[in-house]
Amino acid sequence: MSLGTLVLAVLILSAAAFVAGRRLALARAGGDPRRLHSLPGHYGQHAALLTAVPALALLVLWLAVQPLVVEQRVASLLPATDDATTASLAMAEVRRISVGLDRLAVAEDLSDRDLAALTPEGLAPRLRAVGAAVADVTPETLNAARTHRALQASFGLWMSVLVLGASLGGLAAALLRTTPDFRARNVSERFIMWLLIAASLVAVATTVGIVLSLVFETMHFFRLYPAQDFFFSLTWNPQFRGGSDLSIWPLLWGTIYISIIALVVAVPIGLLTAIYLSEYAGPRTRGWAKPAIEILAGIPTIVYGLFALITVGPALRDWFAQPLGLGSSSSSVMTAGLVMGIMLIPFISSLSDDIINAVPQSLRDGSYGLGATQSETVKQVILPAALPGIVGAILLGASRAIGETMIVVLGAGAAAKLSMNPFEAMTTVTVKIVSQLTGDTEFASPETLVAFALGLTLFVITLVLNVLALYIVRKYREQYE
């Protein structure tokens, strides 16, 4: 049974459990809902939850453990090696051959006996013909792939049996507990509360997982490359044959430089746009202006990158860089910063507009009552009251600017350097993270693992910005509340 079919079967059983639990509760109460402790729907809800949740939890646990058990058994059939990278590549090849055998069985209508009779000779082209990206098939990998396929099928059968059994067991237990005196409402609401708590912990667990993965791989990187060279050198020159210079400062400087230009463009325009739309524009003007501005947020970043490469970059080169003798390249910090600032305008303006509109009208009326003009009210009352939210909007724009990749690739180039000239090509941390993790490179090399150190450094910088913004927000919030 496929995974989708199994989940669908559990959900169907859960729906049937709801109906059965509700009807059974009414039947045992003699058809009078007043004799029940809870509403009939609560009994059905309890039965549905007890039918679905334990079974789905078992399914998730099984799917997490099964690959580990299968690969541990299959690994014993492969030639022993002390190199973790080689073992990982061999296991990946076994998985590809196993998938290829499944596809071959379907394409050529082969039985399990036919698959068992296959020999390694000439098998690779047949597997590639059905879409399996295998390099070569040896007797060891073919034997391991057959074992992998057999274990997958066996474990899949047991998974279906146990999950359906857990679902039916939960249904039976729920129906046995369905009596007029059973506190179904309390149990189901407590059940839902724990489900909500578990759902809320998903974000926390995801954050912890991301941080731990970055930390462990960064520790591995610093065991291969000196930390003092990473933090105190000023040269970025990765050489995958050895002798690399992997300093973060040229990348960090490019990230900060481009982000500052983007915010210099986006913050004033976005904030002034928000003030106009919320305080000065009429309903008709606001009705078409706000959606028109927010269209910018829906444009893919690759389109902004092409705009920077084809239009903005050549224009800046021809009108400013070459006449002033500052450069002759269309890829520059200024190009990426300007286009990124345009991209950030709707984020800052839309959020700031909503925040300004949330300022109580009583503050405006009090200011007007004291004789203040509209501009004085905006400057001395509305903006200070909305400042915490505006700081959050600017922080969101800064985070988006720091994490942007495609605009930088097409607009600023890929040169890692320390320069104050805004018309020179530079790059950012995120661009180098992508470039170091792509291509045919050994994952365990410092030139690849440096991407995790770059990611962790960027995470720490963003965290510091968040803490600083939170401090500013709390300071002004205490002043105006």
Image (cartoon, rainbow, N blue to C red):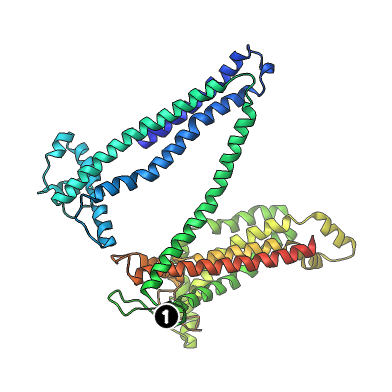
Position in image of residue 408 (x %, y %): 45, 70
178 or 22, nearer to the observer: 178
Q: Residue at x 46, y 74 (%)?
A: 313
Q: Amino acid at mark 1?
A: Asp
Q: Is residue 176 above or below residue 128?
A: above
Quadrant in the picture for residue 406: bottom left
Q: Residue at x 55, y 49 (%)?
A: 201
**Quadrant of the rendering where the C terminus is positioned:** bottom right
Give the residue furthest to the right: 370
- Reading the image, the residue beneath label 1 is 229
Please state if 123 lies on the left or on the right of 45 as rendered: left
Q: Is residue 68 above or below residue 240?
A: above
Residue 382 appearing in the image: no
Position in image of residue 404 (x %, y %): 49, 65
Please state if 303 lies on the left or on the right of 369 as rendered: left
Quadrant in the picture for residue 444: bottom left
